[in-house]
Image (cartoon, rainbow, N blue to C red):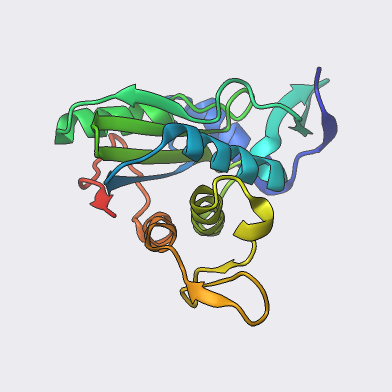
Amino acid sequence: MSGQRTPASALQTQFFLAGQLHPEPALNTVTKAMGIDGAVSPERLARALEGVRQSHVALRTRLQTREGEIEQVVERDHPGPVLEVRECPDSHDALTSAVEATRGSLSPTVAPWKAVLLRHGATHHTFVFSAHRTVWDESSTAILGRELSALYENDGDAERARTIDLSSGSVGAGMADREPAPGGARRLAAALGDAPPLHGFPLKAPRPRLV
């Protein structure tokens, strides 16, 4: 059952129509990949992603056409898991193919964004986030980095996550109680915010940065 429907904005309409002309690969995307050198909990990362999704309407929005008009639909549920985890060789060609497949699978009408954790080994991963420009932009990815980091560090505790100030490198557990911000939270936020976007046809991407 579809959620709340409203007319699409002019910019959403522009990107939607551009996607109809060039459906594969999805050029109108914001895609970032980063390598993570260290242990990662997929379950914890999925909970953090779900927390971010619940907080932002953009991650619950898709487009559809109805009676010749383009409209945005805000859905309550996500179509499938918020995080896909799969094995991937640690090579440039394999990584490039995996990132290309991720962004190429996006659809503004079905799956406007996707998060994938590529597992190269027990302590080596690549995190890929790709979203269609009908719902997402570069500045939104920086926000995602900050909030995802905080929620992952606090394992879904939204109240505590909101006290993390990643810009100043500190965590507030009360007005007078300050402690160093978790290093993992700072690194994840910085990587998602600073990693260069992966654009182009075909995709020509450097190896993801490690954090």
**Image location (x, y in percent) of residue 118:** 32, 31
Figure check: 178 above or below 211: below
Quarter holding the C terminus is bottom left
Residue toward you, 202 or 105? 105
Residue toward you, 69 or 136? 136
Task: From the viewer's perspective, tell me whether residue 138 is left or right of residue 79.
Answer: left
Task: From the viewer's perspective, tell me whether residue 146 is left or right of residue 86.
Answer: right
Figure check: 66 above or below 148: above
Task: From the viewer's perspective, tell me whether residue 130 is left or right of residue 176.
Answer: left
Q: Residue 161's image quarter?
A: bottom right
**Image location (x, y in percent) of residue 184:** 38, 57
**Image location (x, y in percent) of residue 131:** 52, 39
Figure check: 136 above or below 71: below
Residue for point 48% across, 39% down: 45
The answer to whether any part of residue 28 appears in the image is: no
Figure check: 82 above or below 148: above
The answer to whether any part of residue 151 appears in the image is: yes
Quarter holding the N terminus is top right
